Amino acid sequence: MAIIASRGRHRPFQWNDALKHGVTVLICLALLFPLFLMLIMSVKDKEQIVYEFFAIRPPFHFENYTVAFGYIAPLISNSMVLAVGSTLLTVSVTALAGYAFGRLEFPLKNLLFGILFAKMMLPGIMNLIPSFTLAWKLGILDTPLPVILFCAGTSQPFWVFVMRTFVAQQPRELFESMRIDGASEFQNFRYLAVPLLRPMIALMSINVFVFVWNDYIWPLVTIQSFEKRPLTVGLAYLTQANPGDYGMLTAGYVIAALPLLVLFFISMRQFIEGLTAGSIKL
Amino acid sequence: MAAPRAASRRRRRPLDQLLLGLAFVAPALLLNLVFDWYPMFDGIYRSFYRWDGYNTAVWVGLGNFERLLNDSVFRTALWNMAFFLVAAIVLMLPTIVASVVLFRIRHQRTQFVYRVLFCIPMVVPWLVIMLMWQFMYNPQYGLFNRLIEALGMPDLQQTWLGDSELVKWCLVFMGFPFVTTNAALIYLGGLKSVSESVWEAAALDGVGPVQKLLYLELPLIAGQFKLNLIGTITAAMTGYGTQLILTKGGPGFASMVPGLYMYLSAFKSQKYGYAAAIGLTLFLMSLVITLLSMKFFKDAEET
């Protein structure tokens, strides 16, 4: 590394480098363009969108945001309930199961793990309709429960798998010594495994949260009352109900995007490193 | 559990062990059995019935599947699915190129900044990006027709998503620039899995950029590629969120895909049994294609 770095400092302009950065910058620009367009449109009124689409000049209509916020705020709090509920339930059952599969010995362990693991490998497409009828029979339609329970039921096998691997990698002596001191398995889990698993739990929480936050089809079919709808369903409805009012709509999109962006910048390093590192053992 | 000393572990009776293990795994397992496994079997069972959701279900044997074979909408949907599948597989390439280029930027701080920028579209709700594209395609207010107008060629203006010839291409183009953040980061993980010294040695030996690609970088991400390919195939065969939001399968059936047809059969036409049959067919098809592609890779590795 030292050799390359020192050589790099003295070397003249290289087409090679320019190309690499050029390609990457272009990709970033293209990836971010819809968001850029969204910001510009969000301060225009209807006339400006029709007559000066490309211009960025005052008057800026920040009142778009006030109007949009009135629509979006209740949707955000609905989504928050769904996402936080799903994350809490999914993470807790996953951590318990991952610990047991990674650390404990008990009869039928491999069979039980196999049941979880096998479903993970199967496509989930045919679940939608029978899941809907199940939620219907249980009488939980139009509540947050279908989203929370089905999220915990379907998304955890993968994470149980990840946690199991992680727990199994920890040195056995650590757990043995606690046991010799008279700790029960639950104490072992609570005071040893959970702190050890913290980075995994953080990564998993972010993923489950983002998944539920972005989910569209399942809440669309299970939550019918307009005032209970989450952000995604509400945004699609708002767009249909206000054709052409793109200033207000794009302002709404910006507001809708903010909570996750904030979460992302808080947890950025964990998020990116986790995604990059998670796949190494393939 | 109360028995002292480590030796007790060996003496713990199998039943106690089982109960202890179950106490930990039961919540996860129960949720999985009730909300994931049960619906799957229920779906298989329902696909042999005709059921409108209210009246008693009527056993029709393979009737739903026979109807499916002769259903011209389903056939159109299958062709469209094939189109989207091929497009999705071909368009995996830009992500690979982007990840390799990103990886070759050796300055760690710069690379991190690029990675953050790559991540931003992923944390903006997918639906927002989708709705922005809908706006760009809008014939009256949207970007594309405005751009064409500004270039002084108003004859070339299109109805985009409303044009049955163009709609499929429009839906594919929505992925532009076809770099999937998640996949790119997974590839980066693969590239970073060997020690720095390998890259230093390659640089010292004067390995050219093309050789580096063929003999080092591509083999390193082969495993990740397999994983992404299976994900891409499953998503392209069974996904329909985009069509549901933007086109409802239209105009006509020009952008209809089997997943959306399943959705509409159940929730718009109340044909739950028929929808379950479509679901089962789709499930089996994507399973078979996934297994075939895995086997193909395995054979390719062995020869």
Image (tube, rainbow, N blue to C red):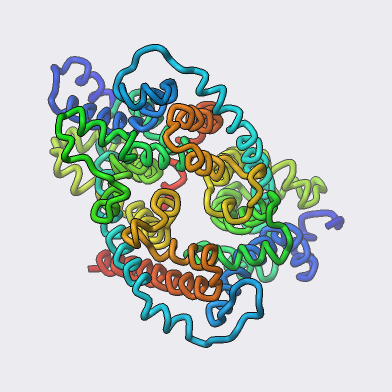
Can you say which quadrant of the picture contains the C terminus of chain B? bottom left
In this rendering, the answer to whether A188 lies above or below B85 is above
In this rendering, the answer to whether A116 lies above or below A45 is below
Which residue sits at x=68%, y=49%?
Answer: A144
In this rendering, the answer to whether A235 lies above or below B246 is above
Taking depth in this image into account, of B14 and A256 the one nearest to the observer is A256
Report whether B153 appears left or right of A68.
left
- Whether residue A122 is visible, yes or no, is no
Q: Position of residue B75 (x, y in %)?
A: 33, 72
In this rendering, the answer to whether A182 lies above or below B286 is above
Q: Position of residue A77 (x, y in %)?
A: 65, 35
Q: Can you tell which quarter of the image residue B19 is in? A: bottom right
Which residue sits at x=43%, y=15%?
Answer: A60
Q: Determine the residue located farthest toward the top in the rendered image.
A: A58
Which residue sits at x=65%, y=73%?
Answer: B54
Q: Position of residue A84 (x, y in %)?
A: 66, 41
